[in-house]
């Protein structure tokens, strides 16, 4: 294992932090959940627990250590562990939730990191930043989306704190309706990404073209089906959705092993496998 914590977006994943969906509920804080609530739908907790167990089994079968945060009653979105922070090789950068409904999650997750002996290297104290907007392009170049849940004040605050460590942060602005950057852009291997291309600003599109990214493109309606919300395990292995048929075929044609997750019940709350996963340790991409 490489020393340190997360060295890349696509190296071999070694450890993740998850939170079971015991108290998951539909809340009107994103377009997907709002649409289901408007239809009078409620969520089936037993189905959610089975779906989450399948996610855990994919990690365990892939020799990835799964650490669990005990879920807290009343925190209806705590399942989506991605969002409270992001990890770098030096330790954790604690974000700041925009939605009041989610703000209490931070203390539980932060205490869990401390219990695990993980250093906190920065904390957002102005503006807002959520982990679903974060990507590493390389060991020193970070991307933070500015959609519905992160803003320029939060990005500026974290940029200042990480500058002494040599990190450059690129901000990527897109429409708020897409929620997080990981809903419209997802890196699955070195310079291979899934994207809803028209949502990305021209400056970021040009960067990806210049860097010769291999882009698998989805349609706008597929954003809200979570067809961009994959979780890479490294070594050309990814967790996708059973329903993500065309993307899965394109990945398999590129030599990927695709673990196909059925989490149709959890998806109603507005998050997929990437949203449910907080990486703790990930090796350098070799």
Image (cartoon, rainbow, N blue to C red):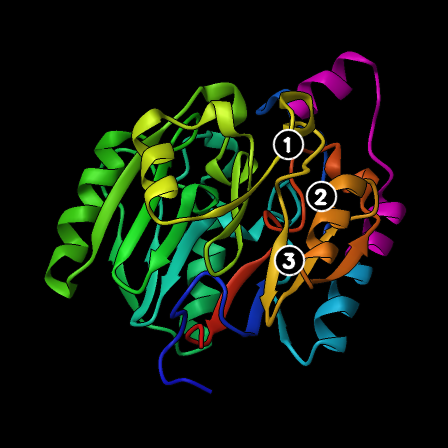
27 displayed left or right of 187:
right
284 displayed left or right of 260:
left
From the viewer's perspective, is residue 164 above or below residue 272? below
Q: Are marks 1 and 2 in contact (CB under 8 Å)?
A: yes
Which numbered disc covers residue 247? Answer: 2
Residue 144 in view (yes/no): yes
Residue 245 found in image quarter: top right
| Helix, strand or loop for disc 2 | helix
| Helix, strand or loop for disc 1 | loop
23 and 132: which is toward the camera:
132
102 displayed left or right of 37:
left
Which numbered disc covers residue 218? Answer: 1
Q: Residues within 10 Å of mark 1 (few under 14, many from 20)?
A: some
Q: Earlier in the sequence, mark 1 or mark 2?
A: 1
Q: Residues within 10 Å of mark 3 (few under 14, many from 20)?
A: many
Circle 3 sits on which residue? 19
Where residue 223 appears, x then y in whole percent?
63, 29
Where residue 50 appears, x then y in whole percent?
86, 55
Q: Residue at x 38, y 74 (%)?
A: 118
Separation of residues labelled 3 and 1 (CA atoms): 29 Å
| Helix, strand or loop for disc 3 | loop
Q: Residues within 10 Å of mark 2 (few under 14, many from 20)?
A: some
What residue span does the magenta drawing correspond to?
A: 32-52
């Amino acid at each position: 294992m490489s020393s340190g914590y997360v060295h890349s977006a696509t190296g071999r994943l070694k450890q993740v932090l998850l939170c079971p969906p015991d108290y998951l509920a539909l809340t009107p804080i994103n377009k997907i959940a709002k649409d289901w609530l408007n239809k009078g739908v409620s969520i089936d907790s037993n189905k959610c627990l089975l779906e989450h167990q399948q996610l855990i089994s994919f990690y365990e079968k892939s020799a990835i250590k799964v650490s669990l945060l005990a879920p807290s009653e009343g925190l209806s979105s705590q399942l989506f562990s991605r969002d409270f922070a992001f990890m770098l090789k030096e330790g954790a950068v604690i974000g700041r939730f925009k939605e009041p409904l989610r703000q209490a999650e931070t203390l539980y997750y932060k205490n869990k990191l401390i219990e695990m002996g993980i250093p906190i290297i920065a904390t957002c104290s102005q503006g807002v930043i959520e982990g679903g907007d974060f990507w590493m392009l390389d060991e020193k170049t970070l991307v933070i989306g500015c959609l519905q849940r992160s803003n320029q004040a939060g990005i500026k605050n974290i940029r200042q704190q990480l500058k002494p460590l040599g990190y450059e942060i690129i901000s990527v602005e897109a429409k708020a309706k897409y929620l997080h950057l990981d809903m419209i852009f997802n890196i699955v291997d070195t310079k291979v990404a899934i994207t809803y291309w028209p949502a990305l600003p021209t400056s970021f599109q040009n960067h990806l073209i210049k860097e010769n990214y291999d882009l698998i493109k989805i349609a706008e309606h597929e954003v809200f089906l979570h067809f961009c919300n994959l979780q890479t395990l490294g070594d050309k292995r990814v967790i996708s959705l059973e329903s993500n048929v065309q993307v899965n075929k394109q990945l398999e044609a590129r030599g990927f092993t695709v673990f196909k997750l059925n989490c149709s019940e959890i998806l109603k709350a507005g998050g997929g496998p990437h949203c449910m996963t907080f990486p703790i340790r990930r090796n350098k991409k070799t």
